Image (cartoon, rainbow, N blue to C red):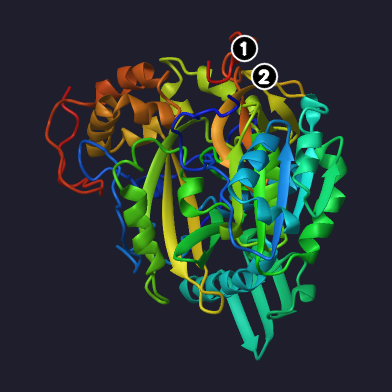
């Protein structure tokens, strides 16, 4: 299908909306009626047609507007994109991976023409047509990682691998769930995850690291993570928390359906060929509560997950104060019926709300 | 006693040990204030090591208390300076000369050790060649995540950013690159509601 790109904002007047298409393909993160941390990795080798898992780098109706929002963030704070000096080669690896993937997966939107090291990249949605020399930084307007990630939805961490450890040594981070690249750059895997409660004691990070260190070229992996955001604000950065934090207090029984968003990260992991670094795209999807509950199964399940989530996790994810309001709203959409296993909406087989 | 036992914390928070003499052809000591005591203790264990030692000492509030005692160890080189910033060009010069076998001993406040460690790592000194021992003040060097300014010697939680004036709470999340803990606005969701400052670890 041809994608109709929305003209919308993720700040100020918040005109962001999901179409019916975007709602039905939303990566709902709960496969059962409860949630606890796990190393929920699976192979990233496509998925059902039309789903966000189908392509290597999903492009959707929000693409053009998300890239405008990223440009605004970077103009305001260039430290959101950083690359330590030894990471330039990994940046070229990432550029190649994204250009090759997008031109193959979306030939109507992106074209890559390669003649030796002379590459021509055409990005039709953003109106870009650039010819450059691969591995020659002077032929691009930005470093290679910044150049390509200004044209790709989602945040990107590029992890160096040495001493049996992953290091957060480069990244483009403007749609983050409240963590700072500028603070975390240079940290190892355990250090940048240090503030996460419980998961260390559960051994989650040790197992995840072991898995990630062994990711091979051509065999990417993926997992989902999630949190909550008031208003469709992509840039929930610690840097700007003193400005956006107040928005969390603006929920009422009347507006919560429109203003409260479930925020889901589709995290993927790719081994890069020249640098042996690990590309770690973190793609953010937002959905309003009123759109979630339009899918009966998701409405039932989200109520149960939020209701039963341990306090520590609700605190860490930043919605402990708003949880009672969320439950008041969501309980209207939970009739107590059982839900089918798995994440899919199952609109044709799950019963309508009966209350 | 100037030794303080820090409570257990998250994995980005540094842990400090006790300086031990090590084999090496050169020994660099960087210390501030009560950090001098760690050097004096180490010298008792291995007095011979001082003949190839370079001591960079910033007395801060301890004034002359330790200067003569350190000199009496007869290190190959001794420097006493008014501030870390003043000592930094010298420190960088020493690191630029460093070769394999240099042992680095850092002691004193977290801010001093963190900054010297960050400098050493940028100069390519192997982490395994760097030891640390906390002595003296438990004050923290804090980075404001909002304006990026560093506030030195923070003793309370919350505290006021010395650059932008926001009220910040003190996190245990620590960046070795910045040699600083992270400070985050405490009243973002309820402007003006700032709890009374409490002394760290009290």
Residue B133 sits above or below residue B142 on the image: below
Label 1 marks a residue whose chain is B
Q: Nearer the viewer, residue A114 or A184?
A: A184
The picture places residue A121, in percent across and down from the top left corner, at: 65, 75
The picture places residue A31, in percent across and down from the top left corner, at: 23, 45
Q: Nearer the viewer, residue A62 or B201?
A: B201
Q: Secondary structure at mark 1?
A: loop
Residue A174 sits above or below residue A129 on the image: above
Q: Which residue is under mark 1? A: B197
A14 left or right of B65 in image: left
A257 left or right of B144 in image: left
Residue B116 sits above or below residue A50 on the image: above
Q: Nearer the viewer, residue A183 or A332?
A: A183
The picture places residue B149, in percent across and down from the top left corner, at: 76, 34
Residue ID at (16%, 41%)? A350
Residue B178 seen in the figure:
yes
Q: Nearer the viewer, residue A217 or A328?
A: A217
Number of dots carrying numbers: 2
Residue ID at (58%, 75%)? A96
Q: How many other residues sit within 10 Å of disc 1, few (<14), some (14-19) or many (≥20)?
A: some
Name the quadrant containing residue A54. Answer: bottom left
The picture places residue B158, in percent across and down from the top left corner, at: 62, 18
CB under 8 Å between discs 1 and 2: yes
Please determine if labels 1 and 2 lie on a single subunit: yes
Mark 1 → mark 2, Cα distance in angstroms: 7 Å
């Amino acid at each position: 299908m041809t994608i109709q790109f929305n003209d919308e904002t993720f700040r100020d007047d918040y005109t962001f909306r999901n179409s019916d298409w975007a709602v039905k393909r939303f990566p709902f993160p709960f496969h059962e009626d409860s949630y606890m941390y796990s190393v929920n990795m699976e192979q990233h080798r496509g998925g059902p047609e039309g789903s966000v898992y189908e392509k290597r780098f999903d492009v959707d109706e929000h693409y053009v507007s998300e890239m405008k929002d990223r440009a605004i963030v970077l103009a305001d704070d260039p430290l959101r994109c950083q690359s330590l000096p030894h990471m330039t080669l990994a940046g070229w690896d990432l550029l190649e991976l994204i250009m090759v993937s997008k031109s193959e997966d979306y030939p109507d939107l992106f074209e890559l023409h390669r003649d030796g090291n002379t590459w021509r990249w055409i990005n039709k949605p953003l109106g870009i047509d650039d010819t450059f020399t691969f591995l020659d930084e002077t032929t691009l307007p930005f470093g290679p990682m910044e150049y390509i990630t200004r044209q790709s939805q989602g945040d990107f961490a590029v992890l160096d691998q040495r001493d049996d450890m992953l290091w957060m040594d480069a990244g483009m981070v403007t749609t983050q769930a409240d963590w700072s690249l500028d603070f975390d750059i240079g940290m190892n895997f355990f250090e940048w995850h240090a503030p996460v409660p419980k998961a260390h004691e559960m051994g989650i990070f040790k197992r995840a690291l072991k898995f990630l260190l062994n990711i091979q070229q051509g065999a990417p992996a993926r997992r989902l993570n999630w949190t909550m955001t008031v208003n469709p604000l992509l840039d929930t950065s610690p840097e700007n928390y003193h400005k956006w934090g107040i928005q969390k207090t603006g929920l009422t029984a009347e507006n919560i359906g429109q203003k409260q968003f479930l925020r889901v990260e589709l995290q993927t992991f790719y081994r890069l060929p020249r640098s042996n670094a690990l590309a770690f795209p973190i793609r953010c999807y937002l959905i309003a509560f009123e759109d979630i509950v339009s899918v009966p199964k998701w409405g039932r399940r989200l109520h149960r997950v939020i209701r039963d989530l341990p306090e520590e996790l609700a605190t860490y994810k930043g919605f402990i104060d708003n949880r009672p309001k969320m439950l008041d709203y969501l309980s209207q959409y939970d009739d107590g019926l059982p839900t089918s296993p798995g994440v899919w909406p199952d609109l044709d087989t799950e019963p309508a709300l009966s209350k | 006693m100037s030794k303080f036992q820090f409570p257990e914390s998250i994995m980005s928070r540094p842990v400090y040990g006790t300086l031990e003499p090590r084999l090496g052809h050169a020994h660099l000591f960087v210390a501030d204030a009560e950090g001098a005591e760690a050097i004096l203790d180490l010298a008792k264990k291995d007095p011979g090591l001082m003949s190839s030692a370079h001591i960079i000492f910033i007395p801060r509030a301890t004034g002359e208390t330790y200067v003569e005692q350190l000199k009496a160890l007869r290190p190959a080189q001794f420097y006493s300076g008014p501030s870390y910033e003043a000592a930094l060009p010298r420190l960088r010069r020493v690191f630029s000369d460093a070769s394999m076998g240099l042992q680095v001993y850092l002691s004193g406040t977290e801010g001093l050790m963190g900054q010297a460690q960050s400098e050493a790592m940028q100069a390519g000194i192997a982490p395994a060649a760097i030891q640390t021992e906390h002595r003296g003040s438990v004050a923290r060097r804090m980075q404001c995540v909002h304006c990026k300014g560093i506030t030195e010697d923070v003793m309370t939680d919350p505290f006021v950013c010395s650059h932008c004036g926001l009220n910040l709470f003190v996190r245990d999340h620590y960046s070795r690159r910045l040699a600083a803990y992270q400070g985050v606005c405490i009243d973002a969701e309820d402007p003006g509601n700032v709890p009374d400052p409490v002394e760290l670890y009290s």
